[in-house]
Image: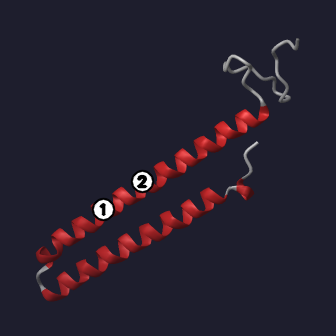
Amino acid sequence: MFNYKKDKAGFYATIVLATLATVIVAASLVLLFMGISQGQWDYYNLPIRFILGFGWLLLVATVLTRVGIFRMQMLKKRQANGLKNQHGELEESSPHGQSAAPHQ
């Protein structure tokens, strides 16, 4: 079973996501307020869009990386539990974690 207390990759991915989101919002707001205070907020429109677009790509890449790591962990766990038979086909397992396939 999955244990959230031992999920280091998820913990670090969450920290990266929170940090990225905070930096993206803070940088966008700083540029927006600078533009408003100078009366030329259109001048900062392109940098704000660049920050938001690039930040969005970084956030998506972080989430996809975490999903990939989680998938690898699931496959590794499945192989460690021996849920594949000799032909590489998945065996059905009972609710008690024992294989439902007949033993030879």
Say whether disc 1 or disc 2 marks the residue closer to the N-terminus: 1
Q: Are marks 1 and 2 in contact (CB under 8 Å)?
A: no
Please identify the quarter of the rendering in which residue 86 is found. top right
| Horizontal side of residue 85 vs 39, given as left or right | right
Q: Nearer the viewer, residue 100 or 29?
A: 100
Per the image, the residue denoted by label 1 is 54
Q: Is residue 80 above or below residue 32?
A: above
* Relative image position of residue 74 (x, y in whole percent): 65, 40
Find residue 88 and name its label.
Answer: none
Q: Distance between the Cα atoms at labels 1 and 2?
A: 11 Å
The quadrant of the rendering that contains the N terminus is top right
> Relative to 7, is 103 on the left or the right?
right
Dot 2 amino acid type: Ala
Q: Residue at x 48, y 63 (%)?
A: 17
The secondary structure type at the circle numbered 1 is: helix
Q: Residue at x 46, y 56 (%)?
A: 62
- The three-letter code of the residue at mark 1 reads Phe
